[in-house]
Image (cartoon, rainbow, N blue to C red):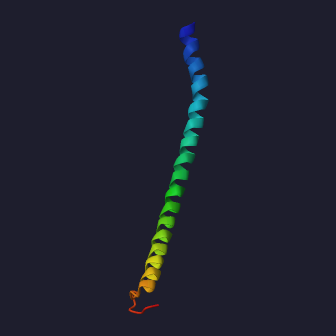
Amino acid sequence: MSEIVVPILVAIISGPLLIIMNKVRKENNAQHGEAQILMRILGRKVDRLGEKIDSHIGWHDGVKDKDGTNN
């Protein structure tokens, strides 16, 4: 009797758990994809900000900008 009951109980318990875990995994993958996009955007903004700061520091030091002026 237990040879029949045990696999049925395992299927009843583990089936819904596997479905929930799979759904959570898919949501997690989607969130990671969104985070990667946001990190790329943030990285570009930080790079541009760094260039502006370097240019401004150069201005204070009397170093000419890329266009040859001393703005």
**Rendering coords of residue 25 (x, y %):** 54, 42
Q: Quadrant of residue 59?
A: bottom left
Image-based side of 35 in relation to 51, left or right: right
**Rendering coords of residue 26 (x, y %):** 54, 45
**Rendering coords of residue 44 (x, y %):** 47, 69
Q: Is residue 41 above or below residue 24?
A: below
Q: Residue at x 56, y 36 (%)?
A: 21
Which residue is more in the foreground, 67 or 31? 67
Which residue is more in the foreground, 50 or 31? 50
Question: Quick one: quadrant of the N terminus?
Answer: top right
Image-based side of 15 in relation to 57, left or right: right
| Badge count | 0
Q: Residue at x 60, y 24 (%)?
A: 13
Q: Residue at x 45, y 80 (%)?
A: 57
**Rendering coords of residue 15 (x, y %):** 58, 28
Q: Is residue 29 above or below residue 19?
A: below
Image-based side of 69 in relation to 16, left or right: left
